[in-house]
Image (cartoon, rainbow, N blue to C red):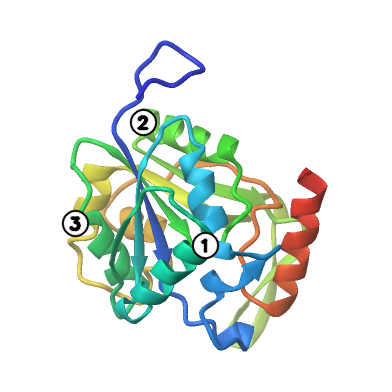
C-alpha cells in the first residue's frame, strides 16, 4: 500500500504485538493488556496505533493460548474488527517473539511492540519503520530525565545522565536480521529485541521516542494513561 504522504511505496511491513503478560504486578485478575483504559482494553489501543500507520503493517498478536477465547470475546463485545493474526505465545518473551517471527516474510520490516504501550504515536511508529529500512534497525528510546547511578558489588557509582537512554518499543528491524538473531539460544542477557540483535553482531540504531509512550506496569499507570489520553483530545 502506498504511503499517502509520498509517492514512494513502503516495503512490506509487520507488527508483532507481544501480549503475554500475566498482570502480576498490577494485582489484577486478568493480564494487564486486557484491563480497561477509558472503557476499552489496553491492547486495542496498541493495535489501533499500528493500524493507523502509513506503513499499514500486517498485525500479529502473540498471546498465551489460554486467553485466545477471552480476547475474541472482548473483540465481539467492543465491536473491534481491525484485522490481525493471533498466534500462541511461549513460556518467555523470547519464545513469544520467535513464534511471531515465524509468520513474517524475510524480505520485509518488522516492529516488535509491547501490548501494554497503548499511547505509542503513529509518528513514532512510522519513523521507526523508515529508520529501520535505512539502517537495518531502529530502537525507540528517550534520554533519562533523572540522575542515574549503578550498583555493583555493593558500590554505588554515578553515571552520566546524558549517556543514558531508556528503551521503549517499537523496536523495528529488517526481518531477515531479526529472524537470524533469534536463531541464537536464549540467555538471560536478552532483555529485549535490541539485546538479541546486538548479541548477533548488529550495531543498534537509536531513534527518538516520547515520554508519553509509557508502559502499563503498575495500577497507577492506568490513571496516568487516562490523563494523557484526555490531553490528546
Question: Residue 26: x percent and y percent?
Answer: 62, 83
Q: CA distance from mark 2 to mark 3?
A: 20 Å
In this view, the residue in front, 224 or 172, is: 224
Nearer the viewer's eye, disc 1 or disc 3?
1
**Along the horizontal axis of the image, is 31 left or right of 60?**
right
**Along the horizontal axis of the image, is 139 left or right of 195?**
right
| Within-10-Å neighbours for mark 1: few <14, some 14–19, many 20+ | many
Secondary structure under the numbered disc 2 in the rendered image = helix
Residue at 24% across, 55% down: 101
Q: CA distance from mark 1 to mark 2?
A: 26 Å
Q: Is residue 178 above or below residue 51?
A: below
Question: Residue 139: x percent and y percent?
Answer: 48, 47
Question: Residue 13: x percent and y percent?
Answer: 33, 37
Q: CA distance from mark 1 to mark 3?
A: 22 Å
According to the image, label 3 marks what residue? Answer: 102
- The answer to the question of whether label 2 and label 3 lie on touching residues, with beta carbons closer than 8 A, is no
**Along the horizontal axis of the image, is 163 left or right of 196?**
right
Give me the disc on residue 133. Answer: 2
- The answer to the question of whether label 1 and label 2 lie on touching residues, with beta carbons closer than 8 A, is no
Give the mark, 1 or 3, whose residue is nearer the N terminus.
Answer: 1
Amino acid at each position: 500500500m502506498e504511503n499517502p504522504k509520498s509517492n514512494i511505496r513502503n516495503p512490506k511491513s509487520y507488527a508483532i504485538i507481544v501480549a503475554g503478560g500475566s498482570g502480576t504486578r498490577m494485582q489484577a485478575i486478568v493480564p494487564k493488556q486486557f484491563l480497561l483504559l477509558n472503557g476499552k482494553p489496553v491492547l486495542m489501543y496498541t493495535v489501533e496505533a499500528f493500524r493507523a500507520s502509513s506503513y499499514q503493517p500486517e498485525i500479529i498478536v502473540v498471546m498465551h493460548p489460554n486467553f485466545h477465547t477471552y480476547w475474541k470475546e472482548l473483540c465481539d463485545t467492543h465491536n473491534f474488527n481491525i484485522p490481525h493474526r493471533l498466534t500462541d505465545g511461549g513460556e518467555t518473551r523470547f519464545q513469544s517473539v520467535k513464534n511471531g517471527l515465524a509468520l513474517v516474510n524475510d524480505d520485509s520490516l518488522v516492529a516488535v511492540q509491547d501490548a501494554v504501550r497503548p499511547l505509542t504515536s503513529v509518528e513514532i511508529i512510522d519513523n521507526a519503520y523508515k529508520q529501520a529500512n535505512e539502517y537495518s534497525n531502529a530502537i525507540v528510546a528517550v534520554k533519562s530525565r533523572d540522575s542515574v547511578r549503578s550498583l555493583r558489588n555493593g558500590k554505588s557509582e554515578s553515571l552520566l545522565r546524558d549517556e543514558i537512554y531508556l528503551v521503549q518499543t517499537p523496536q523495528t528491524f529488517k526481518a531477515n536480521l531479526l529472524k537470524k538473531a533469534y536463531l541464537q539460544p536464549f540467555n538471560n542477557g536478552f532483555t529485549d529485541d535490541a539485546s538479541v540483535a546486538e548479541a548477533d553482531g548488529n550495531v543498534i540504531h537509536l531513534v527518538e521516542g516520547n515520554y508519553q509512550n509509557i508502559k502499563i506496569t503498575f495500577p497507577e499507570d492506568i490513571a496516568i494513561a487516562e490523563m494523557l489520553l484526555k490531553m490528546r483530545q
